[in-house]
Amino acid sequence: MQAFIFTFFTLYVVMLFVITGITSRKADKMTYFTGNRKSPWFVVAYGMIGSSLSGVTFMSVPGDVYTTQFTYLGVVFGYVLGYVVIGLVLLPLYYRLNVTSIYEYLGRRVGEEAHKTGALFFFLSRLLGSALRMYLVIFVLQIFVFDGWNIPVWVTATVMIAVILLYTFRGGIKTVVWTDMLQTTFLISALVITIAVIFKNLGSPIGDIWQQMATVGKDGTDCRLVLNTDWRNNSYFLKQVFGGMFITIAMTGLDQDMMQKNLSCKSLSESQKNMFTFTVILVLVNILFLFLGGLLLVFAQKNGIDVSQFPTDRIYPEIAFNHLGRLGALVFVFGLISAGFSSADGTFTALTTTVCYDILDIEKRFPEEKRQIWVRRIVHLVISVLFLGVILVVANHHNDALIRIIFMVASYTYGPILGLFCFGMFTDRVIPEKRRVLVPVVALAMPVMCYFLSSNSATLLNGYRFGYELLILNGLMIFLTLMLISKKPIQVN
């Protein structure tokens, strides 16, 4: 098994570098940042599936079926609404302004303080969130594969990050668009092959398997449940839908990583075709992941596997490595690696773009293109080191509390970005220059207030517990506070 994994991983890396060699030919400054706006929309649409489904999603969506049934579909329905807003509202705005970094909009509309605040919140959120997602991929691979080879985790992490660094270093977003297509293919193939392997093992018609799902959830619950009608529960249907919608708007439409791929398309119309095609594919893939979760539980029940002894994120890898044979383990490894790589590579280029355009303003500070390329490469390398550093710190102090804290920080930081964009887009008010220093203060204070409210909501709000909708509240509080410190623009006759 180890020899097979090593051989396939080597071939996988070779394929990545072949694509890199092709896409980085005659690369100039804008190739890295915008792909020269020549990316085929259908390639972007397909490749974005891998970017959206991180390694954590690859493991957690099937595993969470055990405790939350199919209620995640509510979030997926919310995604659809969010992508419609992105396609019809945000993409036209970005193309009209011809931005390289989407946070340039905040500078033009609200002020330089808002520009820097939005960019820094994105940088913090993406660095911590993406590094942690990559770490969890590495952690699972370490347990099931690399520990058996006596390879320490720091070596595994360094090799993974070095590979991503090298294939994104020259071509940037142009390379990422095409390598994500390869990685999405591996990810979806892993999903489909795993389903086929389990079906073959169960040897039952799909109708019988569907009926068996009625008793395989936690405490014998029906894992096929979609609508949770308890308004106090985290997975209440309307919470899922509206939370999913605003998560998509904030964490895709207001996220440089995801939007940079869209903005590499030739035109607004092609970018919109990409967004709506991607939405349809993403819904179908998420439905398959949920169905896989039900299949895993039926398989576990038939084979006497007690899934209650595992954290839900471990259900899929435990069954894949220990009960689905060589093929099941192999496709899981490459599905997981593909999900991890396709999530992290875009992060490298997006964070580099944010630093270069939003923080360093390289076009003004360094007029010569050669100098800009040199600065961009240094920034890219530094971000890779920071990314690896976060992974190694977490690896050396691994505990569930630390992981939850980092995820929490990353999830709270999109609220200020959402509030800033809503203020700029849906009002004509301006913040007086003397008050603009309050913008970063407000952006820091509101997430803290939301955290305390969320921590005490069961007591304060008659048992109500926040779910994804906390992002909405965070953004709303930022928006209302900005309204208070702003004023109507002076009318010039």
Image (cartoon, rainbow, N blue to C red):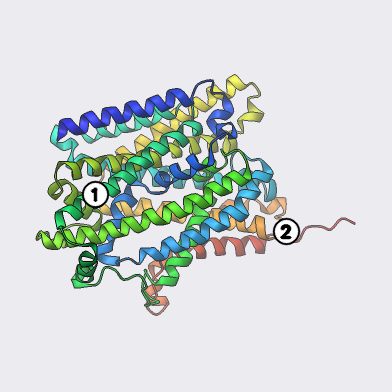
- Given residues 317 and 138, the one toward you in this image is 317
What's the mark number on residue 428?
2
As helix, strand or loop, the secondary structure at mark 1 comes to helix
Nearest to viewer (mark 1 / mark 2): 1
Pointer 1: what residue? 194
Question: Where is residue 45 drawn, in percent x and y?
Answer: 48, 45
Whether residue 330 can be seen here: yes
In the image, taking residue 39 as reference, residue 6 lies left or right, namely: left
Q: Marks 1/2: CA distance?
A: 52 Å
**Structural crowding at the residue carrying mark 2, measured as other residues with C-alpha within 10 Å and reported as few (<14), some (14–19) or many (≥20):** few
In the image, taking residue 446 as reference, residue 163 lies left or right, namely: left
Q: Residue at x 39, y 40 (%)?
A: 342
Q: Is residue 56 above or below residue 287?
A: above
Question: Where is residue 462 drawn, in percent x and y?
Answer: 39, 80
- Given residues 249 and 359, the one toward you in this image is 249
Quadrant location, the C terminus: bottom right
* Earlier residue among tags 1 and 2: 1
Q: Residue furthest left?
A: 304
What's the mark number on residue 445?
none
As helix, strand or loop, the secondary structure at mark 2 comes to loop
Q: Residue at x 42, y 77 (%)?
A: 461
Task: Specify the quadrant of the image occupied by residue 128.
Answer: top left
Question: Where is residue 203 drawn, in percent x and y?
Answer: 15, 57
Question: Where is residue 139 drawn, in percent x and y?
Answer: 25, 43
> Given the image, on which type of amino acid does mark 2 rest?
Asp
